[in-house]
Image (spheres, helix red, strand yellow):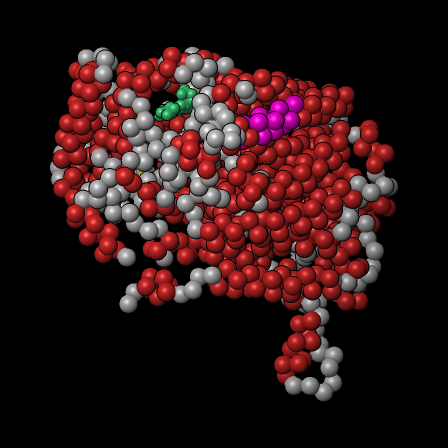
Amino acid sequence: MSFTDIVSNMNLDIYPIISLILFLVAFALIMWSVLRTPKTESNRQANIPLQDDYDLSSTDNMHNPAGKGASHG
Amino acid sequence: MSEHAAQNEASREGLESFVYDDKIVRMFAWATIIWGIVGFLVGVIIAIQLAFPDAGFGIEYLSFGRLRPLHTNAAIFAFAGNGIFAAVYYSTQRLCKARMFSDLLSRLHFWGWQLIIVSAALTLPLGITQGKEYAELEWPIDLAIAVVWLVFFGGNFIGTLIKRRERHIYVALWFYIATIVTVTMLHVGNNIWLPAGFVHLIKTGEFAGPAFLMKSYPVYAGVQDALMQWWYGHNAVAFFLTTPFLGLMYYFMPKAAERPVFSYKLSIIHFWSLVFIYIWAGPHHLHYTALPEWASTLGMVFSVMLWMPSWGGMINGLLTLRGAWDRVAKDPILKFFVVGVTFYGMSTFEGPLLSIKAVNSLSHYTDWTIAHVHSGVLGWNGFMTFGMLYWMMPRLFQTKLYSTKLATMHFWIGTIGMVLYILSIYTAGITQGLMWRAWDETGRLAYPDFIETVTKLIPMYWIRVIGGVLYMSGAIIALYNFFMTWKARPEKYEEPVHYAAPLSPNYEGDPEAKSRLTANAGFGHAGDKFLQGNWHRRWERKPIRFTVYVLVAVLIGGAVEAVPMFLVSSNVPSIASVQPYTPLELAGRDIYISEGCYNCHSQMIRPFYWETKRYGDYSKPGEFVYDRPFQWGSRRIGPDLHREGGRKSHLWHYEHFKNPADTSPGSIMPRYPWLLSKEINFPAIQGRVDANAMLGVPYGDMVLDGAAEEHAQFQAATIAAELEEQGGPPMDETMDKQVIALIAYLQRLGTDLYKEAPADAQAQAGGDQ
């Protein structure tokens, strides 16, 4: 019995459904995580393109929890 | 003053300095506008040919079937492609606070890409093509694309991400990552071929001409090839014409509007939904074809799902201008962006609409599709690119834009051109679609003569020409404007030095979440940490891992579509009477491909009353098992040819190729006088047959040295003799001409279904099951 035989005998109708569920689960997880991002953090991220020509803007230190919420721009 | 400088000096301690490479951006920006105009020009030429077919002057290099792929390739890969690269090189450096990883790779990328474009511009008019839409370029160029795209561009980009000085990878960069990864996968997946001419040369030492040396056959045939091709074709739209432009939108719109994107969270959701959903939607290009029902339903469902995130993205883009609407009235850059994003919304609404089977049954094969893609490419890609160029050019040339007035003029001319184009071609599409399916109460077609449904469209085709000329004129104005801006550049460009701290290697960032639960088992703690969602933010910062996740997401969708097709032989039931093409027919088929007949003719009769009435029995998947590549086509400018075999005499075809207007008054098919005088490449025929045999076509003894060539010569003489009998020219004038091979192929098309199966084939087909 070859691999092709095995696959041919599987019920393929279920195949897209399983994938769809996988997709929905992964997607739900990402949504969850995105919505949980603190507002200050996502504001800072949204501002990255606007501060890219400032030559002193190292943002590395902004990430530490103490620096969170600091405003820059 | 000096105190200030000293202060600056002090505060720069521990920082790294770097200079952006804007020269490479300038190079790509110039290439964008110049190739754009070339692409629009070729578009205008072929648009004129459809309104006035003799505009090809009977010159082979100018014929519609050869130029149309040049137009699409130029618009997509030269105009949009260079535009993407300009956007990526400009924004990536700034978003990463780093110069591109390697100047050498940047230069190799630029020149390699331009070389690919030039070779496309040379090979396509010569008829060197794979015959698959948007993947026409032959194998040596494909190899070059793989290297330039993945190694030069991809390597350079990922290298820059790795040495970046901004911890968070901004969402525009995610879109670029998805583009690079997925386009590589699509390109490789759809270009698995056997280089027939090259193999022939190695095996026999016989050189059968440069065109044959570049000839390849895909390893997939028929339905599989179709599925692969439209998985590619659809996702090229997604990952070449959508995701990189969204990256562009998320960077350049905030820049131009001087405010951050409306909702950063929405942009992330936008990203993941597109990456997840788009890849599944490919089969909507193949509704009512010989594709299995489940695959096409799957494609439809996912296409409709796409509508939501796309509109989320559009709204996010438009709302970025909140509070800046007064500026839109004054600023042409914002105007381009607003119209561009609006067209994104319109095209992504229309796309799902067209994927609904009932709508598709009307729209498919008509100009409706052409209108749809032009609203996408002219409106969305074109206007976003122009908006970006107008914003960038003065900055790149470190001076002011030469004329805002001209830019505004460009905007209006372009918009009017686009509207003329799209409205006329919508009308043409719907008109023709309705005419094809109209029948009267006795069950007869209302317009049985195909040409009636063509001549009706000519006025619309003229309006399209005007629209195209206007759009192109806009681009020429832009070129002039950029040129004048460039002339006002400073003697020497300033190269401002920037400073930023390197990313510390032992960065902790979001601390790993601590479980907030007091009394619980391990799993509960793990679950709670997970729910706090820091994991996403953590791996957002890891470019390589991030890339792998994107790849996994798109691979799942791809696999769901493709795997069953390859493993399940029952998806393509074999039909015992369907036999391989004879050597001469195969050569004729290759002429059909190289002339680009598929740009005007489908070979796929759908199971509708009005189609079977017009063209004959609907197409069965098993009829295409020897078709490498498949030639189902996507637009019927002429009638379907799948059951052309035996419909007309050899003589009719001969006269038709000489001048279609003679046999079919009002025809817009180009003349093919060269087919009547150019000789068949007989020595290459053995190579064609051998290559197909290597791919599993049962050619039997035909692969013996010279057998195929001999057989072809015999069949050509037979057809030439029949042609003479029907009143054509003497047979020794025609028997070695290309037209004979093409007629052989056309007369074979779709006829096997009604034939008696050869005894051994019956046994064979039965054994396959």
Q: Quick one: B583 or B444, which is closer to the camera? A: B444
Residue B24: x percent and y percent?
Answer: 59, 35
Q: Does the image show residue B170? A: no
Residue B684: where, in percent of width, then height? Answer: 22, 31
Q: Is residue B557 left or right of residue B654?
A: right
Residue B256 visible somewhere in the drawing: yes
Residue occupying the point 19% across, 32% down: B206
Residue B566 position by quadrant: bottom left
- Magenta segment includes B425: yes
Residue lying farthest front?
B442
* Residue B737 percent coordinates (x, y): 24, 20
Q: Residue at x 17, y 23 (%)?
A: B717
Residue B481 versus residue B263: which sits nearer the camera?
A: B263
Indicate yes or no whether the magenta region holds residue A40.
no
Magenta-drawn stretch, dominant element (helix, strand or loop) = helix
> Given the current orientation, which residue lies at the most extreme bottom position?
B519
Exactly how many numbered labels are in the figure?
A: 0
Q: Is residue B760 left or right of residue B619?
A: left
Q: Nearer the viewer, residue B210 or B397?
A: B210
In the picture shown, does residue B663 fall above or below B206?
A: above
Image vertical order of residue B439 relative to residue B231, above or below: above
- Bounds of the magenta segment: B420-433
Picture quadrant where residue B679 is located: top left
